[in-house]
């Protein structure tokens, strides 16, 4: 379950401007980037980025090579092969008055989503999982009317056991 | 370096005692000296004044006051291209820094190591639209290899050294260091780096297997070609290229920026490919079954429509930048290497070969380069020939952008390594005159000739002032056709001769030279060409020769932009 597009993990120095350099590169080279998520890594001073590239193999190759040329980029890995751990998180505020509340909570339960906020007319759900799972929930919720949504974009990590434990997370996360 | 200068440097050091706390400005100066810098080109202003203040304490740093910051960047670029060392330019914040932009973009496109030092408003003023504040780091991000905004004097020394390392390592390029005014005044310790950190190549070195696979393709090819580019010059791989070509018997094509990486009088030399390459070169590429690209990047001015370019050829591509491999053309074997080492290893892996028949076939298709017109009129080729004869081929030619650039590329016959300098990737009009200042500073013993059009020379003509003040011995040949010739040619070919805004007048250049305290002459008759060039060489300082050439001459042949060999426009017989 690797999702569409290739997934790159990029480690870069945590300098002001380093992120701008990466996004400026994507724009200037006209690369097809589907999503980009950044945060701290386990190493102090090093940020970690998960990038989803939509293009064909030669485009992905160019993205990797051009990223390597940025001085602040420490490492670029294409983790698409070997069934990487791919997750996305979303907060979804859906219209649900008292008559719909039950149906929405039921759906949430099926997807392992949590209700994190509630008002007279809305429910806010938090879901974490593979993108297709988030996607399905969004689709099912849309008939109620989605008022607001935020998605983190794909975050990725290669498996330590490279293949040995494939499916474990799928089993655990439904 | 005179003894007095050495002494003053010593006393300075003693005064400071260890550990040395210096102002940011002095740290920059010391770091520049440590990097071997002796010349720089720049222009002062508010935000860089502390640096200029400190500069006067370092007489070993020679600063040349240009007339426009663009010229400072081009001069630093010319110096770097001519010497292989990092060129340095300096500007103030805001307009000073933005004036550098064209020069940095020019250096970036052609992989030229330049370090630009710019002043920035003081730290508390940053982000407040302060007077003359421009986010020059943001502006130059896409046109520098890297850039820095320095946030404290303590990191200034390391950053300047890092800037030099980045500029010259791997595929070279410009680096900008933006220094806030208060950082220039701040005190910090400076210790020169104990040893130069070796530049760490990120790509793995190619294995023997890579070279052997390339060698197998080379030995099984019947119609192979080498296309050599700027990378050969940057790497100084002249001997290695020659050894490789002679060992394998493969003919050599040189890109615009590759010109002078291989002697053009060599029997294996074919000339320049692409839009204005001679027909036999492009036809050879069309027929080739193998192309070995070395230190070049399959630029669109070389290939035209990629789908039809070199349709029968497999590609072996050697370049120091891994991102170039496979960027524009699919590659059979990619070799990520510096040309000097890569070519030596490739030669060792290859069997000796010869391709005499293939070479003869290509040469049979050669047309003699432009015939000399009869009568009183002279051709650009004759001007170039006169320069070559008069200088015994020892000159460095710095060319601008346009028709004259193509004529200078085609008709001169470069035999000396790195004797042709031009803005290729960006095609920057106005480049040649300021760049020549850097070339002259870097190679004071070589005659330096600018070849420019009447359009481009007027773009940075103000630098005659710098040339006069510095006493630079630069000779200038203007090929004056009264038009922005290259654009006029496109209008002739593709826009129904609608000569919109390409007619251009010129000042009386001799008079202008006089105003600057220089000498100049107009040359209108064939009989005067050689004598004028000799006269220019006999004069001590800068001389401008204004050659009146045919107004509507064209550069032939021409493969239209994005076109193919089949669509090549050749010279009509009537014009020959
Ligand atoms: C800064 C800049 N502006 C515009 C152009 C577009 N351009 C390319 S060649 C050319 C004409 C050059 O005319 P001239 O300097 O007279 O040289 P010629 O072609 O006549 O030899 C122009 C305008 C350019 N390359 N650079």
Image (cartoon, rainbow, N blue to C red):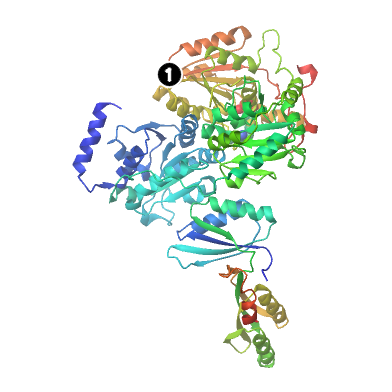
Instruction: Using the rendered view, name the quadrant where residue A85 is placed.
Output: bottom right
Q: Residue at x 70, y 37 (%)?
A: B303
- Judged left or right of residue B489, residue B103 is left
State the quadrant of the N terminus of chain B. top left
- Judged left or right of residue B165, residue A96 is right
- Judged left or right of residue A36, residue B7 is left
Q: Residue at x 63, y 84 (%)?
A: A112
In the image, A77 versus B479, the foreground residue is: A77
Instruction: Using the rendered view, name the quadrant where residue B385 is placed.
Output: top right
- Disc 1: CA contacts within 10 A as few (<14), some (14-19) or many (>=20): some
Report the label total.
1
Residue A116 in sight from this viewpoint: yes
Q: Secondary structure at mark 1?
A: loop
Q: Residue at x 54, y 17 (%)?
A: B393
- Judged left or right of residue B536, residue B2 is left
- Residue receiving disc 1: B517
Question: Where in the image, quadrant-wise, is ligand 1 located?
Answer: top right
């Amino acid at each position: 379950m690797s999702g569409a597009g290739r997934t790159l993990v990029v480690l870069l120095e945590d300098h002001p401007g380093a992120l701008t350099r990466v996004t400026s590169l994507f724009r200037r080279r006209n690369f097809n980037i589907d999503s980009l998520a950044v945060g701290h890594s386990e190493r102090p001073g090093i940020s970690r980025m998960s990038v989803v590239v939509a293009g064909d193999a030669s485009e992905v190759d160019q993205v990797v090579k051009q990223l390597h040329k940025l001085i602040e980029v420490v490492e670029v890995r294409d983790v698409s092969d070997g069934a990487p751990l791919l997750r996305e998180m979303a907060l979804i505020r859906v219209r649900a008055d008292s008559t719909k509340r039950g149906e929405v909570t039921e759906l949430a339960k099926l997807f392992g989503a949590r209700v994190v906020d509630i008002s007279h007319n809305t429910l806010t759900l938090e879901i974490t999982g593979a993108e297709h799972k988030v996607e399905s929930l969004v689709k099912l919720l849309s008939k109620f009317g989605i008022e607001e949504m935020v998605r983190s974009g794909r975050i990725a990590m290669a498996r330590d056991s490279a293949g040995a434990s494939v499916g474990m997370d799928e089993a655990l996360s439904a | 370096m005179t003894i007095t200068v050495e002494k003053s440097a010593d006393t300075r050091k003693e005064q400071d005692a260890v550990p040395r706390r210096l102002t940011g400005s002095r740290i920059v100066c010391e770091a520049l000296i440590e990097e071997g810098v002796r010349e720089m080109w720049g222009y002062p202003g508010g935000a860089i004044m502390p640096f200029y203040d400190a500069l006067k304490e370092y007489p070993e740093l020679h600063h040349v006051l240009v007339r426009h910051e663009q010229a400072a960047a081009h001069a630093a670029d010319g110096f770097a291209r001519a010497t292989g060392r990092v060129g340095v330019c300096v500007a103030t914040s805001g307009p000073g820094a933005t004036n550098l932009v064209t020069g940095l973009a020019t250096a970036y496109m052609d992989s030229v190591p330049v370090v630009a030092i710019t002043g920035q408003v003081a730290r508390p003023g940053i982000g407040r639209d302060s007077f003359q504040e421009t986010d020059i780091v943001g502006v130059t991000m896409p046109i520098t290899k890297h850039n820095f905004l320095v946030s404290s004097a303590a990191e200034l020394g390391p950053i300047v050294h890092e800037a030099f390392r980045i500029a010259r390592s791997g595929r070279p390029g410009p680096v900008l260091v933006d220094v806030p005014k208060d950082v220039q005044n701040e005190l910090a310790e400076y210790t020169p780096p104990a040893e130069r950190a070796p530049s760490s190549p990120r790509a793995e070195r190619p294995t023997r297997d890579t070279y052997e696979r390339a060698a197998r393709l080379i030995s099984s090819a019947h119609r192979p070609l080498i296309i050599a580019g700027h990378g050969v010059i940057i790497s100084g791989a002249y001997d290695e290229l020659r050894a490789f070509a002679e060992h394998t018997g493969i003919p050599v094509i040189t890109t615009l920026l590759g010109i002078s990486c291989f002697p053009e009088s060599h029997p294996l030399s074919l000339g320049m490919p692409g839009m204005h390459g001679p027909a036999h070169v492009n036809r050879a590429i069309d027929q080739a079954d193998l192309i070995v690209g070395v230190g070049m990047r399959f630029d669109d001015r070389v290939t035209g429509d990629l789908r039809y370019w070199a349709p029968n050829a497999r590609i072996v591509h050697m370049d120091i930048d891994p991102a170039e491999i496979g960027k524009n053309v699919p590659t059979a074997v990619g070799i990520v290497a510096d040309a000097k080492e890569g070519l030596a290893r490739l030669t060792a892996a290859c069997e000796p070969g010869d391709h005499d028949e293939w070479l003869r076939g290509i040469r049979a298709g050669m047309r003699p380069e432009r015939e000399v017109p009869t009568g009183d009129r002279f051709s650009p080729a004759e001007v170039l020939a006169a320069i070559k004869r008069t200088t015994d081929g020892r000159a460095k030619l710095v060319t601008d952008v346009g028709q004259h650039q193509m004529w200078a590329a085609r008709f001169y016959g470069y035999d000396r390594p790195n004797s042709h300098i031009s803005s290729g990737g960006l095609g920057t009009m106005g480049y040649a005159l300021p760049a020549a200042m850097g070339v002259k500073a870097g190679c004071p013993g070589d005659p330096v000739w600018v070849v420019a059009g009447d359009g481009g020379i007027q773009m940075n003509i103000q630098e005659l002032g710098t040339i006069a003040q510095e006493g630079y011995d630069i000779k200038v040949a203007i090929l004056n056709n009264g038009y922005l010739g290259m654009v006029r040619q496109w209008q002739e070919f593709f826009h129904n001769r609608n000569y919109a805004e390409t007619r251009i007048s010129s000042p009386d250049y001799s008079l202008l030279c006089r105003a600057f305290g220089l000498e100049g002459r107009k040359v209108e008759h064939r009989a005067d060409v050689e004598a004028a060039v000799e006269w220019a060489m006999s004069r001590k300082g800068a001389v401008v020769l204004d050659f009146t050439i045919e107004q509507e001459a064209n550069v032939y042949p021409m493969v239209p932009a994005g076109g193919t060999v089949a669509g090549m426009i050749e010279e009509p017989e009537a014009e020959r």
